[in-house]
Image: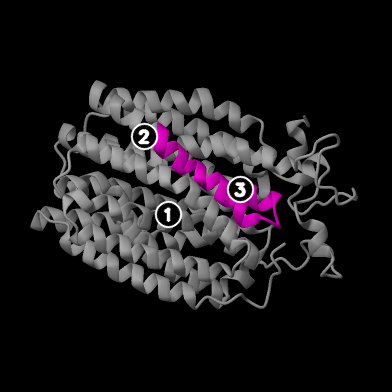
Amino acid sequence: MPSSGQDARPAGHIPAAPATVTVPGARLFYGWHMMARTAVLRALSGGLHIFGFSIFFLPISESLGLSRAATSLVFSLSKVEGAVEGPIAGQLIDRLGPRVVIIAGCLLTGLGYLLLSQSTNFAMFAAIYVLVITVGASVAFQHGAMALANNWFIRRRALAMALISSAVALGGAFLTPLLSRGVYGLGWQWGAAIVGVAFLAVGLPAAWGLRSRPESVGLRPLGYGEVLAHSQQPAGSTDSSVKAALRSAALWTLVLASILRLFGFNAILVHFIPILVWKGISPTTAALYLAALAFLGMGTHLFMGWLADRWPKPRVLALGMASGVVSATILLYSSPGLVWLALPFFVPVEALFPVTWATVGEFFGRHRFGTIRGFITMFWAIGPITGPVFAGMVFDSTQSYNLALQVTIVCFVLSSLTFFMVRRPQTGDGR
């Protein structure tokens, strides 16, 4: 295995090696090995952090005497932090490589959950979750993971991103039920401590073996030779600059559609168990529904990634949001016994995450992807910031999620229509 020091090469460095796509003696492109390691990290993040917040929601609220709006505020504050940190994290990824950032973020996340287990009041809970856990999880498992996939793949970019994103669902399906047992059986403090140990004992070894770019092991990205066949310029020479990307109408259309998507998606996901309890379902059964949602996401992520590599990505995004409209409508109007029908229609909304970033990679290229992604998340954070707090405030004032779900349906409709209008920019060729 190549030494980690090779990752220190500049982002734009391309060696004069042939456009090979395999390690000598290996049949499978080495980038898939990188995706497997990243999938382990994403599974931990999905099962213990992303889906895990909904497991912690009610126990922390009751233990610390918080309203649902106050507990939701912590999640939203974490997105405010993400909006500030995004551009900085993106530039660090482009300069240092995803590997360094992922290792640091994994370490920070693990230590953060150990500290969270000692929280005794709202201020301590909010500070640790927002300033330690969120920083680590965001830079490692979101910014770093997507940048790594974008570095290794040109062809099958959407499938690669979908593969590691499906690991979020895998973690949700198998780790979230275990977390639920720990939190409801031992208490949320023990649950948080166990999560911290998992990130340090399993996540760090997986992150250590990553390689930031194929060039660092003498390879090219998958599909590199196919791109050259259609261009007379060196690979990467026509990648969009940050300024050019920020002037693109395509980028801002994606931003608007994604804000609407993330508003409704996070309003439902953060309040998923509370919503089901409101519908008359027990917390433990609601946790199983959450695991089922994650389980369905595994195949859906892969299907959406496969489809996005063969069909115009904006159309895939629009289709996924149309499915979300059906899901939110069922969730609002169904009886408790029929709530499960909403799950398969909600999964595509979450599965659009890798398709969206594959679209950004296709539109604006490889070498400034981290920085462009960071700037985008600064604006996208509006949705996750406002959605959960809005849902919490609605419930606190009405003891019902009716209005929150009605607004979510409107946001999903508008998001689908906006994604449908996205057109590829003239600059950037997706290398």
Question: Residue 236: which quarter of the image?
Answer: bottom right
Spatial CA distance of label 3 from label 2 is 31 Å
User: Which residue in the protein does label 2 denote?
Assistant: 176
Spatial CA distance of label 3 from label 1 is 27 Å
User: Which residue in the protein does label 1 denote?
Assistant: 350
Residue at 49% from the left image edge and 69% from the top image edge: 254
SS of the residue under disc 3: helix
Residue 292 horizontal side relative to residue 362, left or right: left
Counting residues from the start of the chain, the first of labels 3 and 2 encountered is 3
Q: Amino acid at mark 3?
A: Leu
Residue at 24% from the left image edge and 41% from the top image edge: 286
Report x, y in % for residue 360. 58, 63
Counting residues from the start of the chain, the first of labels 3 and 1 encountered is 3
Label number found at residue 47: none
Q: Amino acid at mark 2?
A: Thr
Residue at 52% from the left image edge and 25% from the top image edge: 202
User: Which residue in the protein does label 3 denote?
Assistant: 92
Q: Residues within 10 Å of mark 3 (few under 14, many from 20)?
A: some
